[in-house]
């Protein structure tokens, strides 16, 4: 879908129809008429079959009015759905206008399908130098790659999470060690085999086969099975961009942990909050909310606000951690950031509800913490009281022991004195007996 409303494209279609009617050889007018008509058909209410007939009729008119022009060849290529068996239209367009900015994405992805990384990177570098890639996407790509471990594999899903990543790798040399693999491109069996040979050894491409789809296996199941298989077999760390389809992320949710703008596939627990904090500190966030000189572009107004919401999940995760740990300064910054991003995407109410839930959880945790602290304080007071009683009992025991020992000493002293008195008594008795003998002896010695 284009960057404007269906009504806007309808008006453009009528305006350019008038121009080609007045100037049938105006290739630019035909080109703009084609794009306006094409974008009108992207509206969900449009009848696909009828729109396809309109587009074929338009291209037939272009083939007569502006044959052999860049505009005709480019429109033919786009109408073919970038099918590789229709590659001649792209080659013809490039031959007429080499290095055309309108075809940077087509040439890049076609070179990737061909396995020609040299040509792909050259085109991506030209695209970067053309300065037509929104700075928000380049910043997003830089930040997304930050969350991937060295030599990791990062599965992406669309244009906005693939081209910018390839670009910062090719043009800026940022994290070239990461294999950025678009899962939609993997549905091409030859490309999947190329990735299996060069970046994900022994990848089971059969899991993405058209036979499985024909047998009723859904695309999301095929992709989920493939990612899980790669993670189980590969020695490289595996990540999934958080731009992934909800069904795929849910199917892998028991093994995915948020680490920045990517989710790491891991069968073992790890401190994901610590990893997220480290990565967040390295993020470039200057252009997330307001990009200078690009405030009023269609991309900034319509596409970027929703993509920028991918920053909100890690911000809120860190907000909850900051609140739980009492870092109110950081929590305030993260809250303001999340609310600012959400307001641009008109999703502020959802974020506010989450923040309220976090506040309630924090308050409940604080209540439980305070209650636990009171229980611990009571237990400590009881312990101290018990300790005082124990010490008092010990003092009483020691005092009783001293008294017992004193009584024992007194008993020993009394026994000693009794023995001494007994010896004195016995000595007195001996003296008495000696005196009695002496008296009797004296009596015997007296003359009659």
Image (cartoon, rainbow, N blue to C red):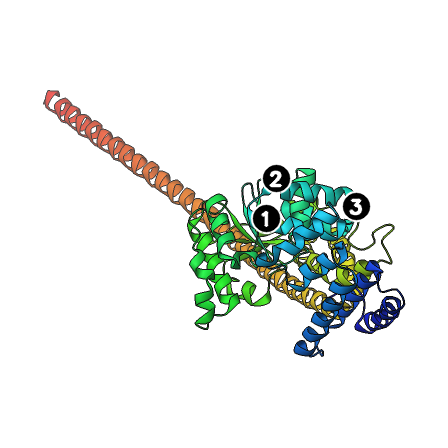
Looking at the image, is 169 positioned above or below residue 242?
Answer: above
Image coordinates of residue 163 in percent, x first then y, are 67, 51
Q: What kind of element bears circle 1? A: helix
**Earlier residue among tags 1 and 3:** 1
Label 3: how many Cα within 10 Å (few below 14, some 14–19, many 20+): few
Give the image location of residue 354, x and y in percent: 69, 67
Q: Is residue 152 left or right of residue 43?
A: left
Image quadrant where one finds the N terminus: bottom right
Res 362 → quadrant: bottom right
- Judged by depth in the image, the label closer to the viewer, 1 or 3, is 1
Q: Is residue 246 above or below residue 441?
A: below
Res 327 seen here? no
Say which residue label 3 marks.
Answer: 131
Q: CA distance from mark 1 to mark 3?
A: 21 Å
In this view, 364 is above or below 436: below
Residue 255, placed above or below residue 448? below
Q: CA distance from mark 1 to mark 2?
A: 9 Å
Q: Position of residue 328 (x, y in %)?
A: 74, 54
Pointer 2 residue? 118
Q: What kind of element bears circle 3?
A: loop
Q: Is residue 339 left or right of residue 87?
A: right
How many residues crowd around disc 2 within 10 Å: few (fewer than 14), some, or many (20 or more)?
few
Number of residues whose C-alpha sits closer than 10 Å to that of mark 1, classed few (under 14), some (14–19) or many (20 or more): some
- Tag shown at residue 112: 1
> Along the line of sight, which residue is nearer the eye, 217 or 273?
217
Numbered disc total: 3
């Amino acid at each position: 879908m284009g960057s404007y409303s269906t009504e806007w494209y309808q008006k453009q279609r009528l305006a350019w129809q008038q121009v080609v009617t007045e100037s049938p050889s105006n290739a630019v007018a035909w080109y703009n008429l084609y794009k306006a008509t094409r974008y009108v058909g992207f509206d969900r209410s449009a009848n696909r079959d009828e729109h396809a007939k309109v587009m074929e009729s338009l291209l037939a008119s272009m083939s007569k009015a502006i044959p052999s022009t860049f505009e005709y060849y480019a429109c033919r290529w786009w109408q073919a759905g970038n099918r590789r068996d229709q590659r001649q239209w792209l080659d013809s367009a490039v031959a007429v206008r080499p290095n055309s900015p309108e075809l940077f994405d087509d040439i890049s992805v076609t070179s990737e399908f061909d396995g020609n990384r040299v040509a792909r990177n050259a085109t991506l570098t030209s695209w970067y130098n053309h300065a037509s890639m929104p700075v928000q996407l380049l910043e997003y790509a830089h930040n997304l790659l930050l969350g991937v471990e060295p030599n990791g594999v990062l599965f992406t899903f669309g244009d906005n999470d693939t081209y910018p990543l390839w670009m910062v790798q090719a043009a800026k040399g940022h994290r070239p060690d990461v294999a950025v693999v678009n899962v939609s491109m993997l549905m091409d069996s030859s490309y999947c085999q190329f990735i299996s040979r060069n970046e994900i050894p022994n990848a089971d491409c059969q899991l993405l086969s058209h036979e499985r789809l024909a047998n009723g296996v859904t695309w999301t199941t095929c992709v989920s099975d493939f990612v899980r298989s790669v993670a189980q077999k590969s020695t490289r760390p595996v990540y999934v961009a958080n731009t992934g389809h909800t069904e795929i992320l849910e199917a892998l949710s028991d093994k995915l942990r948020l680490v920045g703008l990517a989710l790491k596939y891991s069968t073992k627990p790890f401190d994901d909050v610590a990893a997220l904090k480290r990565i967040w500190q390295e993020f470039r966030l200057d252009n997330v909310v307001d990009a200078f000189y690009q405030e009023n572009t269609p991309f900034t107004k319509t596409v970027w606000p929703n993509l920028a919401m991918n920053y909100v999940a890690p911000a809120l995760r860190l907000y909850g951690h900051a609140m739980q740990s009492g870092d109110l300064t950081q929590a305030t910054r993260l809250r303001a950031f999340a609310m600012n991003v959400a307001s641009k995407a008109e999703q502020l109410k959802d974020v506010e509800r989450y923040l309220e839930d976090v506040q309630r959880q924090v308050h409940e945790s604080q209540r439980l913490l305070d209650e636990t602290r009171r229980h611990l304080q009571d237990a400590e007071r009881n312990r101290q009281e018990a300790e005082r009683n124990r010490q008092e009992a010990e003092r009483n025991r020691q005092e009783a022991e001293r008294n017992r020992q004193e009584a024992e000493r007194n008993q020993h002293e009394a026994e000693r004195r009794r023995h001494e008195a007994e010896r004195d008594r016995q000595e007195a008795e001996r003296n008495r007996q000696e005196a009695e003998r002496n008296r009797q002896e004296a009596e015997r010695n007296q003359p009659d």
